[in-house]
Image (cartoon, helix red, strand yellow):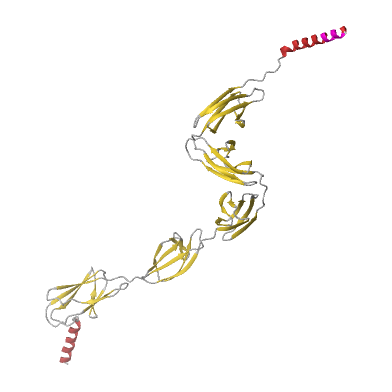
Amino acid sequence: MRSFIIGMALLVICAAVPAVSAQIGGDEGWYRVHCNIDGADVYFDGRYQGTTYGGSLDVPVYATGTPYNTIRVEKSGYHTYTGSLPTSPAAGETADVYVTLQPVETAGSIYVTSSPSSAAIYLNGQYKGVTPLTIPDLSPGTYSLEAEHQGYQSDSSTVTVRSGQQSSIQFTLTPIERYGSIKVTSSPSGAYVYMDGNYRGVTPLTLTTVSAGKHTIELDLAGYYDWTSSLSVSPGVTSSINARLSPIPSETPGAIDVVSYPPGADIFLDEKYQGRTPSAGVYTISNVHPGTHTLRASLSGYQDYTTSVVVSAATTSHVTATLQPGQSTTTGSISVTSSPGGAQVYIDNVYRGVTPLTLDGIPTGTHQVRLALAGYNDYSTTVELGGGSTSSVSASLSPIQTPGTGTAPFAAIGALALIVFLVALRRRD
């Protein structure tokens, strides 16, 4: 009974002493485990040694005991670290062990690009930004993506996100058709083609990237009547025009449509004044004989624009005069005033307006100026005009003289005397 009690006492004492691997005599040394994460569990050769705190954990070992070989450090949410321990520390010494735990990446991301770029991206219906775009912090799973861009058809797709990975997707958007085409042919071919008043080429011709809507097509060909038609263009559709041109007599006059930039230019055809281009639209010179003509556009402060124009019978030719800033050296100006005002002004027998009037773009040289006003005698003079200069004409118009009331008695007396003389002659007979 006594020996049983002694055995039980020894068993309790042994159970109270912590089990240390191979703690067979000798003094203690220490492993100091440095870890970037507190609360990590440390194991030597699979045996739990403690939990890191304050960035480290000291594990005592006996210098004379069986040495440990491996270390394992783990914490939830981080990848487990395993490695080999350095040589066991001597008594009273410390061996440092450095461990870095890496977090387990549970989120993923999506990288979105598009052609063209700057497309709006929606993730599960929620706007996220414009491409190129990275959508971060996504839980693993499948998502729906939609790309939108003005002028392009929308596109959508699904993307699967995996833990710790980035998924990529490219949207190639299709343009929305907003243009059509017009195929223009003529009989005979070779006709000049104008769309909405702008020259585009000669037939046969296909006009591409034509905006949707209504357009006017005009065909001009020497010796044939002008041909005009309107048509509507639909997006993505090619419309066709086949014009049969009608021949015209060779002596039928034609016309010239003139547009100037800037507007307000004086137009001369073969140096004969025709008129002034309007602020908007076209100035038309009618009844032009077929053949080659010289057209000049003149505007104060700009150089004259001169070009040759071929006019065909019953055909309208088109001229766009783009004036360059500068002073013309081949033309000048004539300033005309009269007293009283409102007189009609004729330059070289061509009516140009009423006084007071300043005329630009007059060719240099000698010109005849005539003023006419009802009730007044015409006034005529000549001016010598130099390049870039202004000649002034100031006319004091004289009223037309009519018989005054003071001569009436004398006329009556003369008539009476004539009657008396005739009567006397009769009596003699």
Q: Is residue 224 above or below residue 374?
A: below
Indicate the position of residue 268 as horizontal and vertical percent values.
57, 37
Side (left or right) of 43 relative to 377: left
Q: Is residue 225 above or below residue 388?
A: below
The answer to whether residue 422 is magenta is yes
Side (left or right) of 245 relative to 96: right
Indicate the position of residue 96 as horizontal and vertical percent values.
18, 72
| Residue 281 appears in the figure | no
Q: In this view, does 348 lie above or below 248?
A: above
Q: Residue 139 or 159: which is nearer the viewer?
A: 159
| Residue 14 appears in the figure | yes
Q: Residue 381 or 178: which is nearer the viewer?
A: 381
Indicate the position of residue 138 as horizontal and vertical percent values.
40, 67
Magenta stretch: helix, strand or loop mostly: helix
Query: Where are the magenta residues, as a range?
Result: 421-426
Q: Could you say which quadrant of the image residue 213 lies in?
A: bottom right
Q: In this view, does 13 lie above or below 357?
A: below
